[in-house]
Image (cartoon, rainbow, N blue to C red):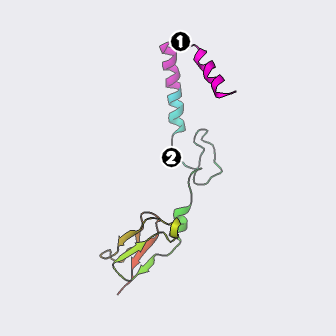
Amino acid sequence: MSTSLFLRQLAKARPVVVSSTSMFQRAMATQTKAEAALAYDDKSLNRLERTESIYKLGKHRSNALELVNQVPPIEVEGDVAVCDGGGGALGHPLEYIKLGGRGGEPVQCIYCALRYVQKPH
């Protein structure tokens, strides 16, 4: 069906009048189903059916942080680390990360989550 034909048929359609009580009852029933479907306590379940998902961390989740955490912290000699994502044009904007005064604790880049730590003197 072409777009113009669809729009003509839509213009000819008459609005349906529904009593407010039935609309309210339908809205309440839909609301309770939606509340049940949106219980996000377990991301491994499908969102609407709440059945077991084939995705371990949820459909739009990834294990990127697990993979980044497998990379050991990068040791830097100075007080400031500069991170560009390491991808050249595919990296991210430069971030200057202050490492001094952290007591040897690693600091993450806000873009790529790589960790940097100051070398012991």
Counting residues from the start of the chain, the first of labels 2 and 1 encountered is: 1
Q: Give the magenta part as a residue range.
A: 1-29
Picture layout, residue 3 above or below residue 63: above
Which mark is on residue 41? 2
Query: Residue placed farthest to the left in the image?
Result: 101
Q: Depth check: 77 or 31 in front?
A: 77
In the rendered image, residue 16, in percent from the top left (x then y), is placed at 56, 13
Which mark is on residue 17? 1
Residue 14 is covered by the magenta coloring: yes
Which mark is on residue 73? none
* Left or right: where 3 falls relative to 66: right
Q: Main secondary structure of the magenta part?
A: helix
In the rendered image, residue 6, in percent from the top left (x then y), is placed at 64, 24
In the rendered image, residue 104, in percent from the top left (x then y), is placed at 36, 77
Quadrant location of the N terminus in the rendered image: top right
Q: How much space separates mark 2 and mark 1, taking CA atoms?
A: 39 Å
Instruction: Identify the residue shown where x is 64% and y is 46%.
Output: 52
